[in-house]
Amino acid sequence: MISTVSVDWNDLKVFLAVARAGSIRGASESLKVAHSTVSRRMDALEFALKARLFDRTPDGLLITSAGEDLLGSARTIEETMHSAERSVAGRDRELSGDVRFTLPLPMAVCVLTDDLASFVEQNPLVNLILDITEDLLDLSKREADIAMRFTSQGNSPPDYLVGRNLATQASCAYASTDYIEAHTFSGSNRNGRWLGWDDVVEYPKWVHSAGLEPMPVMGSFDDVFVQMAFAKRGLGMAFLPCMMGDLDPGLQRVPDARPVPHTTLWVLTHPDLRDSVRLRSFREYLYDVVSDKLDLIEGRGA
């Protein structure tokens, strides 16, 4: 089909997005373009191919047999294009250009802000682009060049990525100084309480490993920065990453609580990008700055 018809690669990208999302609206959101743009490109593609690619139904779009035929070819073309982009980026020999780096918000705000700013200052020709998310973006499609991610202990990143295990993150129980002075956390007179993480308001079993006794749970605050804010306000105890709790002057570790290691920190990239000077330099910079912060990340800083 594609070999006998002139097809715009941008139209194929839209087609793939529609096939994956199952709707025009979903494709427009994933591509970050207008709904009308997706519709117009789909109309243009169907006109060029003289074939209907999707049936419109009350439940959404259903791909036709012609669409299925195109889908395999479009995926092959997509991977070829991404491979070519990675190959060119991987041969880059200058410390300049974009570095797309994705990392979790706590690492960006609590640990690496100064270091990332220093890298930018030291390398003025590098354009650092941050994507703050917990999601593992598709590095094969250049959604990011380098990813910093936490995985559960014992779990490894996807096989198609290469990287390095840098640290094991630990968390501990924290509360405000006033809260700790006013409450008891062990024995029959204990009267501390936990800030809840989700809709199930029950004693969190994971605090056994922190060496603490059961105490009641109050509320639901399903965000680590919200937990920290309410703990500082004196509402209760929060189980926070040590790299957050140990740095905040408004918090202290709860008496007798010990850090609990629970997730592994990785820096990851696609194999085709290993030889890019700017990306290799940035990765090595991350290795160095994280190695200097191991005590903080692994809970040995207090």
Image (cartoon, rainbow, N blue to C red):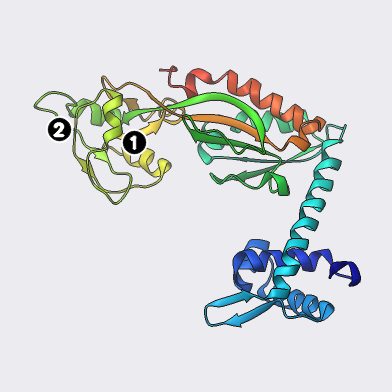
Residue 7 on image: x %, y %: 85, 69
Considering the image in quadrants, where does the C terminus appear?
top left
Q: Residue at x 82, y 30 (%)?
A: 277
Query: Is 148 positioned to the left or the right of 205 in the image?
Result: right
Q: Is residue 212 above or below residue 132?
A: above
Measure the alpha-carbon separation of dots 2 and 1. 18 Å
Q: Is residue 251 visible?
A: yes
Secondary structure of residue under mark 2: loop
Q: Looking at the rendering, which quadrant does residue 159 occupy?
A: top right
Q: Looking at the rendering, which quadrant does residue 215 occupy?
A: top left
Image depth: mark 2 or mark 1 in front: 2
Q: Which residue is mark 2?
A: 191
Relative to the observer, which residue lies in front, 61 or 265?
61
Query: Is 142 positioned to the left or the right of 56 in the image?
Result: right
Q: Is residue 230 above or below residue 178?
A: below
Query: Is 222 positioned to the left or the right of 84 in the image?
Result: left
Residue 244 on image: x %, y %: 44, 31
Considering the image in quadrants, where does the N terminus appear?
bottom right
Q: Residue at x 32, y 29 (%)?
A: 173
For this orientation, the residue located farthest to the left is 188
- First in sequence, mark 2 or 1: give its number: 2
Residue 92 on image: x %, y %: 86, 36
Q: Which residue is mark 1?
A: 232
Residue 245 on image: x %, y %: 40, 29
Q: Is residue 298 above or below residue 144?
A: above
* Amino acid beneath label 1: Lys
